Amino acid sequence: MSGRALLAIGCDAYAELNPLTGAEADAAAIFELLIQPQIGDYDANRSRLLRSPTLQEVRLALTDMLFGDQPLDTVTVMFAGHGAVSGGSFYMAMSDSRAHALSATALSLADLFRMIAEAAPRQSYLVIDACESGGLISDLNVILKSEVMGELGTPGVTLLATAASNEGAVEVGGHGVGTTALIDCIRGDTFLQDSTTALDLVEIGRAVSERVSAAGQQTPVVWGLNLYGPPGFCKNPHAGTGNAPLRSVLVGWPDAGTSAAIGTNLRRLWEPYVAIPTRWEPRAFLNAIAPLLSSVGDDSEMRINLARRIADACAAQASESRDRYREIEVRAACVVALLPFAADAKVEAYLVATCGEIAALVEQVTNAAVSAIDAYAFALVTGGMSDLYYLPIRISKLLGWAGFAVHAALAAGEDCGSAGTSLADLFARIFETYSLSLVAMSDEQAPYVLSTLTAASRAGLNEQSERLLGHLFASGVDCRGRVAQADLDPSKVLEFLIARTEPPEEASIDMVAQPTELVLVLLRASRLFDLAEEFDTSLEALDHLALNAYLPDDFLNFGAEQIMGGVNAVFQIGHDVWSVGDIEAAWPNRPSPESPGVAMAALLASLLFPDRTPWFLMPLQSSVEITSEESCVASA
Amino acid sequence: MASAAAEPDPRFRCLERAQYEEAFETSFASLLGKMQANSRQMFVSKQNILRMNHGGTWVHAARDPEPDTSMHSISTEWTIPFKDIAENDLGLIARTILPINEEMEKQFALNMYGVVGAAAEKVGNVVDAKAEGSFAKSMLEMFRKIELGVDRNGEISMPQIHVGPGMAEKIAKELESVPPEIEAEIERVKAEKMQQAREREANRKAKFKGSAS
């Protein structure tokens, strides 16, 4: 059981004083935050929230909290309401307090400290957001010099008062400005430091003081005497994160509302942001930035600006990773996050430009991969036994991303010669050392293989494409099309590999993609290189195999975790199709992306989330031959 | 003398998911663990396996000191050729896992026989087949020296004979040609040992307070 107790008092309703509107909400907001284990870790069973209580109710609550059976380590008392200095003493007014009888009807700070001193917790925190609450300092000087604290030993005492003695507390939007600033510090929206695991009220108080004073509304007072032990007001949300670059996202927004909205949503980004170099999860990252981009209303320029800031901050974090593709994936995720807004022309233009920048990075990394393989042939073997599964997938990904660079150049109306040459160089190194790893292993490969083959086709790399396609299709036939599900649980991978060494019929069906998009990609791509008739002769070996293509209604939500609408076009070999031509003849006429920016962002979505395939890259039967004018030729 | 600079890692890390690799490693270790558990059962029943998380020795504090109560570690290492990975040679799995398991099983067996041998040596429970003059006589001597146990169901546990593959066939033949008088004596000693085992078990049980026996 935690030895931490919190009493939050908010007083809006007064029998004989003017009513307030935000005090209860302030107290409730602080209370709800601090009892959360990951934030304040105050013991919910020992903590109380009192809304407009009488003096007697407060005294009873204090008695229970301070003098219960269990040891008390830390006490925090928060008061929001009317405060007043009378006769050199500070009083907190409760619902039944009278202005001219404060000593008898209000809670004096001296009384509160006598109780705390008797209970003798190791640390005490007092937060007061009230008129004249700065007056508590004069009271405190008396209290600390007197017998009140001295006899029992002085505990660590820290006070934060958010209105000076001659000022009134200001409420904005239902909350006191001091409380709002305090909440921002506790939640981590206002960055204090990232070197200690807990925050003390003194350092929070300084930040609150700066913010509130800068607004010219109040002059908070912070007073701390914590001589006993480490800080412990609340946990530090930024401990060890070293996330200074991300803070730059918050700087310099034109209006306070936008800044606050961004600040609120930015909290969700901390965790995925910190994980970028080590445990990168594109979905978690996208889920964190999507609300941020939605928080800026309809202003597309502001949204683009925010997306760019997030991308730059997170790309800087990605540079800490040993993974050469991490920055590219992070930037790609920021592009995909903008996809739902791409109907706006400015966003569309930004997507095209940004995809071009990402393509340039891809080309650099592809060339670096080529150099690495030249220096050490097995440079791509980076795992252990698991690479029997992951290396074929990783090679598909490398080729697929290199294909993206070709597609992006063409989408921007530029020459793809350079990107095509990089792709050709990569092909050459793969064929030299890794040709036996060009196997159909998982449905996860579908979007990458499609990106590669369509890009290679447009870059005139037909020979390389035929070779790649031949390897993949042969292995696909060998395993009877039983490739792994795209989202195969990594703990099942070894089992899948062992099953793959057995006859295909033995493969555990619950690990196999059924239907499969990868085999459908291979079959449809055969048309691009005049291999369809040859593949047709192997289709009997794939008898009964179910194939699928998910085709969305539109591409603005192509990055969503689950895309609504659209259609799954299913074909079953030997039941409704017997040749590649049958598939093409029955291929549904579905919408393509409406603009180059959407198309490239949708392609990035499928490269980040390979459970969706960019079928729009595959030219329809009628247009296969009409590619010469749109193509470029790579020098191999 | 200048020291050689560390070689830079020549590998090109890209498009990795550390969490997937970790999950694979865990499943690999789990498979090896299951195989080891199966091997262990050949020597020790599950009921006699104690698991401890800390320390490097143990004592049966209420018993007389035992000869060797230190933890013995068994370990092996294996090499995965990058070429086999690059060529997607799935046979690598069996070629790696089976030798690992065999090596671990071998080390476990050596430890087991070492511990059993040391314990037998200490109490003089060693039979020299040459000194006895024949297999039949050494079998008889063996029965005279051992004590039979009683399992948790109250059944007598007969001794197991662990021999190398070549010896098993020889022993089977020898057992068929044991002279009748020695066989009778073996049976008599066996019956006597079984009776002694039951008595020991009854005495053990009788030590519980309120025991019916």
Image: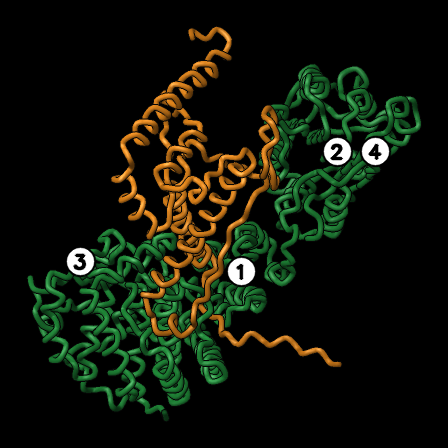
Chain colours: A green, B orange
Q: Chain of mark 4?
A: A
User: Residue at label 4?
Assistant: A135
Q: Can you see residue A280? A: yes
Mark 1 lies on a secondary structure that is loop
Mark before the other along the chain sequence, 1 or 2: 2
Please give the name of the residue rendered at 50% of the width and 68% of the height, measured from the top-left corner. A326
Q: Chain of mark 3?
A: A
Looking at marks 3 and 4 on the same chain, the residue that comes earlier in the sequence is marked by 4
Between circles 3 and 4, the one closer to the viewer is 3
Question: Which of the image's four quarters has the N terminus of chain A?
Answer: top right
Judge depth for marks 1 and 3 and give the one in front: 3
Occupied quadrant, residue A151: top right
- Residue underneath mark 2: A125
> As drawn, is A228 to the left or to the right of A194?
right
Dot 4 amino acid type: Gly
Q: Which mark is residue A505?
A: 3
Left or right placement of residue A395 versus residue A613 in this view: right
Which numbered disc flags the more N-terminal residue, 4 or 1?
4
For discs 1 and 2, the disc positioned in front in the rendered view: 1
Residue at image mark 1: A278
